[in-house]
Amino acid sequence: MPAEHARRIDFAWELGGHTGHVATLLPIARAMQARGHEVRFLLREPRAGADLEGAAGIPREAAPITEAPQLYASPRNFGEILHNFGYQDARVLKQLVDAWRERMWLSHAVVASVAPAAHLAARTLGIPSLEISQGFHVPPPALPAAPLRDWEPAPRAQLEEADRRIVGSINQVLAAYGVKPVASIGDLFAGRAMLLTYPELDIYPERGPVEYFGIPHTGEGCLAPAWPEGRGPRVFAYLYNYYEGLARLLEALARLGAPTLMLCRGLDPALKRRHAGGCILLTEEPMAVSRLLPQCDLVASHASHQMTAQALLAGKALLLLPTQMEQFLIMRRVVRYGAGLGIAAADADFGAAIAELWRDPKYARKASEFAARYRAHDRGAALATMIGRVEAALAAGGPQAAAISSGQRSGSKTES
């Protein structure tokens, strides 16, 4: 690409945890870099995903984030989640948006994975922004945002009050830069979101007609070890070292003689020694998921969207061990669909669940149905479509971004 057509693109992640956000953004960032654009990661966890293949070639910086009191121990919708990040306080939110503006001042576009403040900053700078998300953080544009806990009565008046505080704060910040207001939290993402999920996994089934991209190929590791010996089912696992039930799960796998490949960063060395040389291979190096999934019998994970979808596309039954709300909601969708079992309590019987998944073919059958339904879905084409939309956004927004004046930086009127 000629230098005069190259653009600077920021890939942003603000809310949430772990490496999934980086893995999602990485293929698009690499593709745009290969097209001659200047790309950069702005990440909540600056070192997250640094060990993924191809990640080393992309500069990374810390993203602006807020530290706020947890007003809602169990948020009931996305509005209440944003309260836990200080979004209801216009002063705090403006400081956050201004920090993003400082980072993005010379950028021509933003591609975000859960970065609402980056979208707000992009609006005030007059540059395009796109959200690439599995949907949990992209509620439909309604007031209030849809409740997350469909098994509990939804206190609509309380949800509306919470959402109005957030929307009011957002609009105060936008007004400071002369940008038109939003009517709901979901309006932040209207026309900007590319949903990397499937109807079966979308936690907002009431979303209505929408374009689902499914999951494209994402960043993954290179390690593809041989399976250990064992008499039980082959289990591919990706778990967190702080999971309360980890030691008991490992013991259950060992008792079953289940040949297991498990990624677990920061694992207690004592646990590692206890299972060394047995049927469980524990590693902290990212594995080549796409190569190993076809070889296993079932998958154990915390119900992260990416790992869950990859397992279903490979036709594998799932043991899901959620540690937070988004994972719990994905677990419920999978269990309702019939392709796996979920364990919400760390003192549950892991061995019985693994044996059930292995011996009863109904779970793998449902996973195979999912795989067959989306076998014709070209994951490479989905990625190409997303890359095309980023390029189109640059073409539409590049001249405007290039013309940003120092007056606009100080808050003169503009519309997005």
Image (cartoon, rainbow, N blue to C red):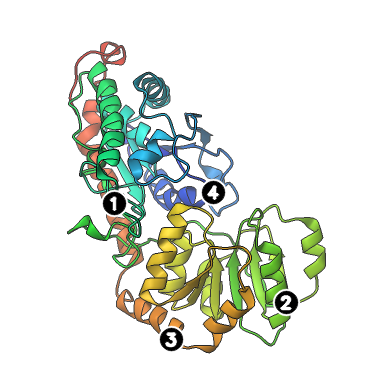
Residue that carries the numbered disc 1 in the rendered image = 194
Q: Is residue 136 above or below residue 73?
A: below
The residue that appears at 28% across and 65% down in the rendered structure is 199
- What separation in Å lies between label 1 and label 4 (alpha carbons)? 21 Å
Return the mark for residue 254: 2
Return the mark for residue 362: 3
Of pointers 3 and 1, the one earlier in the residue sequence: 1
The residue that appears at 69% across and 88% down in the rendered structure is 231
Amino acid type assigned to the residue bearing label 1 in the image: Met
Amino acid type assigned to the residue bearing label 4 in the image: His
Q: Of helix, strand and loop, which one carries label 1? A: strand
Return the mark for residue 18: 4
Of pointers 4 and 3, the one earlier in the residue sequence: 4
Task: Name the mark nearer the viewer: 4 or 3.
Answer: 3
Q: Are the residues tagged 1 and 2 within 8 Å (C-beta)?
A: no
Q: Of helix, strand and loop, which one carries label 4? A: loop
Task: Name the mark nearer the viewer: 4 or 2.
Answer: 2
Amino acid type assigned to the residue bearing label 3 in the image: Lys
- What separation in Å lies between label 4 and label 3 (alpha carbons)? 32 Å
